[in-house]
Amino acid sequence: MAQVLDGKAIALKVREEVKEGVDVFRAKYGRAPGLHVVLAGEDPASAVYVRNKEKAAAAAGIDGHVHRLLSSVSGEELLALVRKLNADDSVDGILVQLPVPDGVPSAPILEAVDPAKDVDGFHAVNVGGLWSGGSALVPCTPSGCIRLLQEGGVALEGARAVVLGRSNIVGKPMASLLLANNATVTIAHSRTKDLAAVCREADVLVAAVGRAKMVSREYVKPGAAVIDVGMNRDENGKLCGDVDFADVESTVGVITPVPGGVGPMTIAMLLNNTLRAATAREENR
């Protein structure tokens, strides 16, 4: 049977590391790192995510604030708030919760965030830093996946890795991080020919396509490490990933469950990014 990576336990470990780092930061600089989340609209899932981030920040000793705005907010008003937070010296991290309300383009909002405070790692400056091997704040979910692999003892150097999905939020930065860890990386997607055969070549397979239980046994190499980023509902309305866990568990060597795998890591790495951003800002004064 596969080694099942406990994302909750590993995320708790990261959060404890962040809490210790925040204590050191507070002692050195006389303040706590500041994280500000912008939540526009009444999307129920977003509201839950933001509440969880708020609680996690408080538990880590981070000074967290949520700016809750009506769905009638304009793009200009959102931009004005982001610029205000950019100029506020007590703010180290800014996160604009997606999706923003209909009719408001998200790209200009995300591009307006100061790259030094971009704890989501979505700004073009951070994307470029990641791909060029420079200093960058890295998207939280991919960095969480890397930490899961490391905690699971999965050797990445020289490994053949396949990332199934090419989004800017997960697929592309995941590929870059695997490259940085000296894996040989293929990005596969819906247009890839012989998709299952390509995935079967992977020592490390990261599934991030948003299709419930798409990855079955025919997609995986025996003994492979499989990271399931998907969060879907199956035909019975039950939470599930992109990987058919029951079908592949007896074949693979390492696997993450859904829920309880990648999900908890995302918030943990957000806290880690906030501490990193705050430390960098203080050191660069």
Image (cartoon, helix red, strand yellow):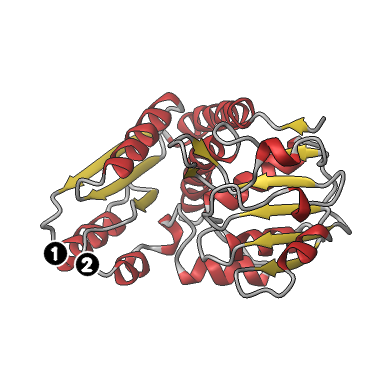
Residue type beneath disc 2? Val
Please name the residue that numbered disc 1 is placed on.
74
Q: Secondary structure at mark 1?
A: loop
Relative to 33, residue 167 above or below: below
Q: Is residue 262 left or right of residue 97?
A: right
Disc 1 to disc 2, C-alpha distance: 7 Å
Q: Is residue 208 left or right of residue 22?
A: right
Across and down, in percent, residue 6 comes to 66, 28
- The one nearer the camera, 32 or 224, is 224
- Residue at coordinates 49% horizontally, 36% vertically from top-left? 239
- Residue at coordinates 39% horizontally, 49% vertically from top-left? 93
Relative to 82, residue 251 above or below: above
- Residue at coordinates 45% horizontally, 66% vertically from top-left? 123
| Residue furthest to the left | 72
Q: Is residue 52 left or right of residue 5?
A: left
Residue type beneath disc 1? Ser
Comes first in the chain, label 1 or label 2: 1
The reply to whether the C-beta atoms of the residues labelled 1 and 2 are less than 8 Å apart is: yes
Across and down, in percent, residue 208 comes to 58, 55
Residue 104's disc is 2
Image quarter hosting the C terminus = bottom left
Q: Secondary structure at mark 2?
A: loop
Residue 283's disc is none
Image quarter hosting the N terminus = top right
